[in-house]
Structure formats: structure tokens, C-alpha cells
Amino acid sequence: MQLLRGVSVLVVVPVLAACSMLQAPPPITTEALVGEWRAQCNTLDVSPVLSLEADGDFSVADFPTDESDPLVVDGTGEWGLDEIGDHGKFLDLRFHRGDHDESYALLLDYEDDDFKIVHYLGDPDDMNGCWFSR
């Protein structure tokens, strides 16, 4: 019985040590998102570039939309963080396009020690879209 107790201590200590080394990702803040983001898209031959400014303005080139006309746009507008139910935080892009505004909610994720911005085209279950990173 003494041997089994020693074995369980040996197993528990490394597991607890490994868990203490894991850190939660930093909070998603507007300050953490400011800067230039470049995307790779898996269904389109475009390379969008998104610039988020500290004052809440943004500019984007080659941004794919869900619309059929036009499919890829350049534009400017305002951005901010938003929460949608239990789905977490989203990047809200509000484009100024001619006589109307359009809004897009892009998913925010944390991967490889940095944030990722995901713009799904159509149903997210189809995994078609663009993944922005720095």
C-alpha cells in the first residue's frame, strides 16, 4: 500500500506542474488588435490586408464579402469589439460604401501566442474564409 501511495504522488505532481505552466490567453482588447493584419483565404485567390487604427478607424484592401456583386472590396470605416451571446468577442467592421453602410462580424481567436481574426464566407461549418494574422 505504501508503494501505491508513492506512485500516485509521483503521477500527480508532474500533472499539477504542467497545468501551472499553462497560461490563459490575454484578454482581447482594442489595444491588442491595433495594427496591420494580413490574411490567407482558402477559397479565393486574394490576400486581404486590414489596418486597425487606435482611433477606431480601419482600412481594408481585397476584402471578400458574402455578396456576389462585388465579391472583393476595398474600403474604410469604423471598427470595435462586440459580444454575441455565448460565442465570445467579435471584431465588428462597419464599412462606408457609397450611400449605405455594411457591417461584418469577424471571429476573434487566440492561437500560437497571438490573436487571429477569422472572416468566414457563408456557413462557418463549411470552413470557407480568410484567416488574418500579423
Image: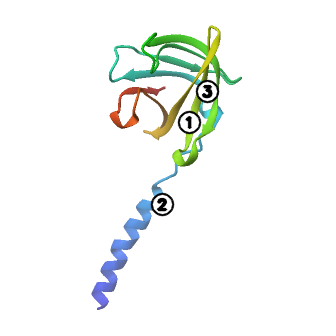
Please say if 109 is above or below 61.
below
Circles 1 and 3: CB atoms closer than 8 Å: no
Label 2 amino acid?
Answer: Ser
x, y (%) of residue 15? 38, 66
Query: Which residue is label 2 attached to?
Result: 20
**Image point 57% across, 40% down: which residue?**
89
Q: Quadrant of residue 84?
A: top right
Element type at mark 1: strand
x, y (%) of residue 40? 38, 22
Query: Which residue is label 1 attached to?
Result: 90
Query: Which residue is label 3 attached to?
Result: 34
Q: Quadrant of residue 28?
A: top right
- Work out whether residue 113 can be spotted: no
**Image point 39% across, 26% down: which residue?**
129
Label 3 amino acid?
Answer: Val
Please say if 13 is above or below 63.
below
Residue at the outermost right position:
55
Q: Residues within 10 Å of mark 3 (few under 14, many from 20)?
A: some
Label 1 amino acid?
Answer: Phe
Q: Residues within 10 Å of mark 1 (few under 14, many from 20)?
A: many
Element type at mark 2: helix
Query: Earlier along the polypeptide chain: callout 3 or callout 2?
Result: 2
From the viewer's perspective, is 106 left or right of 99? left
Q: Closest to the observer: 19 or 32?
A: 32
